[in-house]
Amino acid sequence: MSGENQRVDAPRTASPAAVPRPPLPHAPAPVQASRARRLAAPALTLAGAVAAFAYVGAVDPNEPGHYPVCPLFRLTGVLCPGCGGLRSAHAFATGDLPAALGANAVAVAGYLVFAVFTALWLLRAFRGAPAPRIALRPVHWWGIGALVLAFSIVRNLPFGSALAP
């Protein structure tokens, strides 16, 4: 046995959780960011969205030559879920909600969800609360995806032509 590798067990020690630790010194309280700093991200996000809607509201996508054509529609003739989104944004920005819904109802729902989320984000940042989180379960995300897919399929069928832009 002298030439063989022998396993030697190390003496057992207490687990780290069982070893008493000295008390930690009092940690300083987290520094609260200034109100302007907390509002910067939601305000800049809102400013970007307002600028985008102002541009689309001023430059009509119904006039040819201002925006590119959807590549899926150009190559296949199939309307994607976003087709009509710029026309919808133009109508929404100019206050024509029925035309916005007619161009792309899913996009209008997205604009409204974005508006509510941004307003909540601004309010929470103003109060010093953490930013809101979208905490949907996977089944809800799958449901949203299924609705968008159904919208895309139906708007390409003859009986769903009312959903086409």
Image: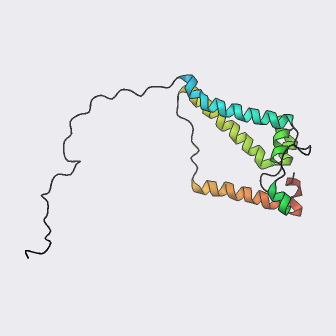
Asked whether the viewer can see residue 41, the reply is yes
- The quadrant of the picture occupied by the N terminus is bottom left
122, 5: nearer the viewer: 5
Relative side of 55 to 17, left or right: right
Q: What's the residue at 65%, 38% (across, down)?
A: 117
Relative side of 63 to 41, left or right: right
Q: What's the residue at 73%, 59% (across, down)?
A: 149
In the image, farthest residue toward the left: 2
Relative side of 102 to 28, left or right: right
- Quarter of the image holding residue 122? top right
The number of numbered discs placed on residues in the rendered structure image is 0
Position of residue 82 measured from the top left corner of the image (x, y, whole percent): 78, 51
Position of residue 2 measured from the top left corner of the image (x, y, whole percent): 7, 74
In this picture the colour scheme is: rainbow
Asked whether the viewer can see residue 95, the reply is no
Is 63 situated above or below 119?
A: below
In the image, farthest residue toward the right: 63
Position of residue 6 measured from the top left corner of the image (x, y, whole percent): 13, 70
Is 7 situated above or below 19?
A: below
Q: What's the residue at 47%, 25% (across, down)?
A: 32
In the image, farthest residue toward the front: 3
Position of residue 33 measured from the top left corner of the image (x, y, whole percent): 50, 26
Is 135 situated above or below 150?
A: above
